[in-house]
């Protein structure tokens, strides 16, 4: 009986014991085995939306989109709009003690054990056909040029 009371008091003070707390911090409160797709914070900050995320939202409408609440809302809003468009529920997860590297996670409430969840970061810039921009001269170089003339 004494053990039960002590356990009950511990749960009251610190909350229920969680399995794999380090993994839960890393995966925005979820577990790796439940993840469908993940983006790092730097990928979420990019201006474009990853098509793989949209495809996964279409393919897994029962999953939940978890977004890192330590990031600015302006970065998250495009994915919130995407989740709303595809009727996928989302949650903004904020952990003040730990800032996870992950910025976005699509996950289920149960294990699916998908092997590859991370999207490889690929940057391709369109350069063909674009005019080259002239380099602007600094104020110092303008003054220097006028003095030398």
Image (cartoon, helix red, strand yellow):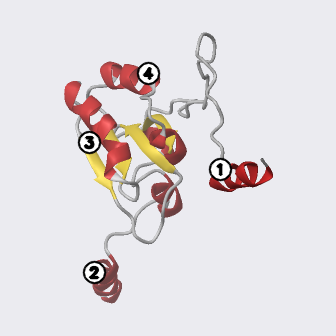
Residue at the image point whose x is 75% and y is 55% from the top? 147
Instruction: Name the front one of labels 2 and 3.
Output: 3
Instruction: Name the front one of labels 2 and 1.
Output: 1
Tell me which numbered mark, 4 or 1, is placed earlier along the sequence. Answer: 4
Q: Position of residue 115 (x, y in %)?
A: 57, 30
Instruction: Name the front one of labels 3 and 1.
Output: 1
**In the rendered image, which residue does mark 1 sit on?**
138
Q: Position of residue 132 (x, y in %)?
A: 64, 22
State the SS at label 3.
strand
Residue at the image point whose x is 29% and y is 41% from the top? 77
User: Would you identify the image quadrant in which residue 96 lies?
Assistant: bottom left
**In the rendered image, which residue does mark 2 sit on?**
8
**In the rendered image, which residue does mark 4 sit on?**
51
- Relative to the observer, which residue lies in front, 35 or 75? 75
User: Would you identify the image quadrant in which residue 58 lies?
Assistant: top left
Lateral position of residue 21 relative to residue 143, left or right = left
Tell me which numbered mark, 2 or 3, is placed earlier along the sequence. Answer: 2
Tag 4 and tag 2, C-beta contact below 8 Å = no
Q: Is residue 56 visible?
A: yes
Residue at the image point whose x is 34% and y is 82% from the top? 10
Instruction: Name the front one of labels 4 and 2.
Output: 4
Question: Which corner quadrant holds the N terminus?
Answer: bottom left
Q: Position of residue 133 (x, y in %)?
A: 61, 27
Lateral position of residue 34 relative to residue 82, left or right = right
Residue at the image point whose x is 38% and y is 38% from the top? 107
**In the rendered image, which residue does mark 3 sit on?**
90
Instruction: Name the front one of labels 4 and 3.
Output: 4
Q: Is residue 27 above or below residue 125?
A: below
């Amino acid at each position: 009986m004494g053990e039960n009371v002590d356990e009950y008091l511990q749960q009251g003070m610190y909350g229920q014991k969680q399995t794999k707390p380090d993994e839960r911090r890393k995966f925005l409160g979820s577990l790796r085995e439940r993840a469908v797709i993940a983006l790092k914070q730097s990928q979420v900050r990019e201006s474009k939306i990853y098509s793989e995320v949209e495809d996964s939202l279409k393919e897994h409408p029962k999953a939940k989109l978890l977004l890192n609440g330590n990031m600015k809302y302006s970065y998250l809003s495009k994915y919130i709009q995407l989740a709303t468009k595809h009727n996928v529920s989302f949650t903004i997860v904020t952990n003040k003690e730990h800032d996870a590297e992950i910025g976005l996670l699509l996950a289920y409430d149960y294990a699916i054990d998908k092997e590859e969840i991370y999207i490889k970061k690929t940057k391709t810039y369109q350069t063909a056909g674009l005019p080259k921009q002239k380099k602007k001269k600094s104020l110092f170089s303008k003054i220097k040029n006028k003095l030398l003339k």
